Amino acid sequence: CARAPMYDFQEELVIRPLHSGDIYASFQFRTVWDADFMGDQKVSHYRLFPKSLGQVITKFSVRELHISFTQGYWRTMQWGQPYLPSPPGAELWVWFQDTVTDVDGTWKELTNVLSGIFCASLNFIDSTNTVQPSASFKPLGIGNVTDHSFLRYATLPREIVCTENLTPWKKLLPCGSKAGLSVLLKSEKLFHSTFHSQAVHVRPVCQDPQCRTTSMELRQTLNVVFDLHTSGQGKREWSLFKMFSRTLTEACPLASSSKVYVDVTDNPQVRPFELSPATPLLTQAVVLGDRRTYSVYDLTQQASFGSSRSLNMLLRWKAADGEMLRPLLHSERYVAGYGLQAGEIHTLIYNHHPYRAFPVLLLSAVPWYLRLYIHTLTVSSKGKDNRPSYIHYQPSKDRERPHLLEMLLQLPPNSVTEVTVEFERALLKWTEYTPDPNHGFYVGSSVISALVPSVVAMDTNSTLDRPLFSSFFPCKEEASYFMRVYTEPLLVNLPTPDFSMPYNVICLTCTVVAVGYGSLYNLLTRTFQVDEPSPGLAKRIANVIRRFRGVPLL
Amino acid sequence: MATAEVERKRGQLAALSIAVVVVLVGVPLWWRTTETYRAWLPVNQINELAELQLQLSVDVEVVFSRGTLMPEQQKKVPFTRTQEEAQKVDDDTTLRYRYESKYRTANIMEEDALKQPTAAEADLSLHTLSASPCGSVVVYVIPETSVLLPQGVDVYIGHRRTAVLRMGAPMSVGKNHKQLLAHLEPRITQVVQVMSFSHTDITAALSDRVRLSPGSKESLADSMRSFKSSPGYEITFSLLNPDPKSHRLDWDIEGAVHSYIQPLLTKLAPLANFSIDSQILYYAMLGVNPRFDSSLEAYTLNADSLAHVINPVEARLGSNAASSNPVLNFLLYVPDAHHSPLYIHDHQKQPVASNAFHSPRWGGIMVYNVNDLYGRGETPLPVNININMEKVMGVFLAQLRLMLGVQSSPAPPGFLVEPCGGAGLADWELDRLMWSRTVENVATATTTITSLAQLLDQIGNIVINDNIASQVSSTVTSLQLAVAELEAGNLGFALQYSKEAILASERAFFDPSLLHLLYFPDDQKFAIYIPLFLPMCVPILLSLIKIASEARQRRKLKQSKKD
């Protein structure tokens, strides 16, 4: 008889004041369950792990599942790197177990079920927007799977995220929205922000340092950026209450750890802002290649709440702050060209590292109705041709699958690398147009995955008790860290017909046919008679005179 | 003049030939190109099935033990008899019950088995002698003086498909063969009705087809309680913890399911597929605030307010994402320290012994009070509590039996029914369930398939794919097989076919290709056709009318000339 499975639940909130005056709050909830989802035995008794998600994972033999819903675009140059990047709209990528035989069928069913669970239009994911990346999306959990036929990736850039997606997401939390950090998740404030992203990540992780047994990890993350001007009324003064219209009073009783971190890295020297109530607890963590200092509020300690029995952190700026560390990697993408026939997609990738070159993987999935001319693909950096060391290109098939272009690029230090490819717009059938076709068609974000050289030594010991926000991407070496950057989605206009045209065409053709037919019919059926030509005017007058005179008529 | 006449004739001929071409070529072409694809459906067979004539056959074996038959009667044994009974349920549905009884005397081993000290042991050893097939009944007739049955008990029904019947006093039985049968037959029929089916069960199973006359409120409630027949069920146990700050709950659900629920479900495996799961929900509240009763020093929930308990909880339960089978919910609610103990009161304001209630076709809720485990207020919160699963599962098992329709209808007087043992279900109870489920499946599948046929008949614009046609035909075949197997008395096969029928019929009925029907309203169709049809048809019609009127005039002229 096996011992009862162990559970662990942690919750965490990180607050990072941004240099633009906005504020970034990132929630992470992590449930770990020592159950073997990949074994033969069916998992059916759930405790902290949500049953609805667990059933889906069991039924569809999912190895890893990553789903995110994002409203707004993360501005890397203003805000720096997010803890967990996500593209605008919905993104879903799934690694199936190698026991799945019909991966495409399972994927279709899975997207339908997930769209029911999260109240989203994930059911619009079909073969025309699904790709199998060959290198960009490696499993984040344990297991070194290389056969990418078990991987499916899809984005829906047009997906609008709102309250109806947040409610089912909150239902997956053990404490719901009743206790702990999740009381702050009120939709009226969360969606009154410039950036909102919520995600669910399920993956197998190691149970112990030797990795003899595995457990299932569920991470629910929610990132939100509050705007200085719309939510902050232009004052650089933030508090929990001002952001979420709630304060914290208790930790979730089921959580083994419940902490709030505030990024105070710049504070010791420059002191740009003041944090109250002050906390003696400081911790350092290496996040995204940088050593940051955080003030920690441990909600499991009664002392954190003070005499008022509620925690309402206040950050008040005293001075205009200094320069932000420029992110080492960022990118831009746009469509060039004019007219409705041809165009060009430009992707610019910036390496801001002063002296180190590093490789990046660029993935773009382009819908079939933009027909890429792959022979026009050019990659150049610093005015010179930059030949990719690896290219994986899968051409599209009309109405069946999109283009997939993946390449490995070496970015020279302090440079801009430009990738351009020309395309031609296809004509759609009149039922294939989306509602409001004049708005344009979205092309999902390109994904840039990179191992960026780190300024400080990264922490490679994965078992060490680290804050959740710094432990999502596994780190294999000290000198570099993994990072993913999403470009802007594109909005492309396609030639759009006048949709009342079919009826006009029918009417016009029918009229033409009817006119032709009518004259033909007339010609065929009319009776022709030889008619005496009527006498001319002079003759008639002459006849009148002749009648008077009694002379025979002419 | 002559040329003008020829020319007129030519014009008329041209108009006529164009009309002929339009009728012979144009109309069929238009018809063929705008036609919707409709595969052939076995409409006649569906209509035959709409008039359901079910015949249920039961094999009954009556075994006389030594000392029950007079010598004169013994000469006639063995023999067989067939009894038939027809019942008309409504205009479209007729039921016929057929009892095929085989009478024989007991062999030596059976005699030995019947000599066991108690009825239960006799039942077991009779079972080891011969296993009777599914759906059949064996009745052992023992002498009046036998001590096998306790005083006052005439009929004993065990765990299997056997019953033991006391013969009755010799003078009341009579001497000859006819008298014997007249004495035994009504009693055997009674036994069979308990062990396989009764007319009320079958009509209740037909409720999908037949609008029953509103009977008593109680019987209606009974018939509404159990779940509809379905090829699979999901059973979900949920532990509701309204306040994880005051207590931390744990339950050994794996072990409890294994030892209490699984045996019953294994037994029910031929009927349907079951899957079990469980979850713990935190901060899950009941929808009503219990009232504090100071005389009892406890909180109480009235029977009237129970209806409002479920809805808020249901929102948290979550639907089963991975299947579409009906879900049976069993909820265990452990009230928090400030609201316990909590008792459920019935309509008579008396506390319910099990402290549980069930909601028809939904599941059951049990309240589990743990306030006595808190100690005297010194223990720090939260208190760790392990739930006594034996107590909980006893209640849930009883509710599960109700929900699945395993009825323990009160036995007629003089009957002794052995209480269900470890498996939770006797063989004959399973048979009973199989009879009614088979009839229910047949009824549901016929209703589904006839309404689908009607719908397709009414709306001519629906495209019928070959896929749907094949599903419909396989439904019809399975239904015919199921009816035939019922007639032959092969209950197991009948159930199997009826399940196939119901699956195929649902698949055909809910096929998504039926939804996006190519349907245009008639006015729009006319708007599209008029620009073409009007200019084409008007000249043709006009010239036809002209030709007709000229012909009539000419005939009139001829007539007048003749006159």
Image (spheres, rainbow, N blue to C red):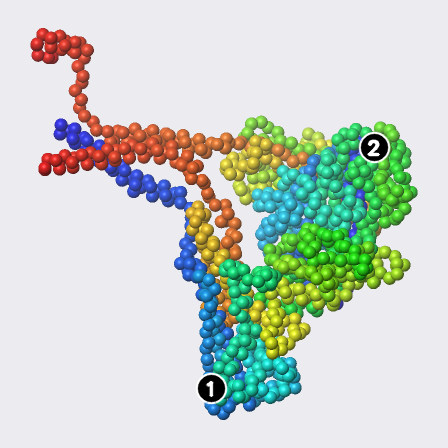
> SS class of the residue under badge 1?
helix
| Image position of A254 with respect to A411: above or below | below
Tell me the number on the disc at residue A491.
none
Tell me how far mark 1 sits from mark 2, CA to CA. Answer: 105 Å
Asked whether the viewer can see residue B128, the reply is: no
- Depth check, front residue: B290 or A507: B290
Q: Quadrant of residue A293?
A: top right
- Do discs 1 and 2 share a chain? no
Q: In x, y percent, where is residue A112?
A: 61, 49
Viewer-proximal residue among A458 and A100: A100
In the displayed orientation, state which residue is furthest to the bottom.
Answer: B71
Q: Which residue is tagged 1?
A: B177
Apparent side of residue B106 relative to residue B348 in the rendered image (left or right) = left
Q: Nearer the viewer, residue A240 or A288?
A: A240
Q: How many marks?
A: 2
Q: Is residue B78 left or right of residue A510?
A: right
Chain of the residue displaying label 1: B
Q: Amino acid at mark 2?
A: Glu
Q: Which mark is residue A237?
A: 2
SS for tag 2?
strand
> Which quadrant would the C terminus of chain A be assigned to in this image?
top left
Q: Is residue A507 left or right of residue B376?
A: left
Q: Position of residue B58 (x, y in %)?
A: 50, 74
Which chain's residue wears label 2? A
Q: Are marks 1 and 2 in contact (CB under 8 Å)?
A: no
At 44% from the left and 61% from the top, the residue drawn is: B91
Callout 2: 10 Å neighbours few (<14), some, many (20+)?
Answer: some
Q: Residue furthest right?
A: A280
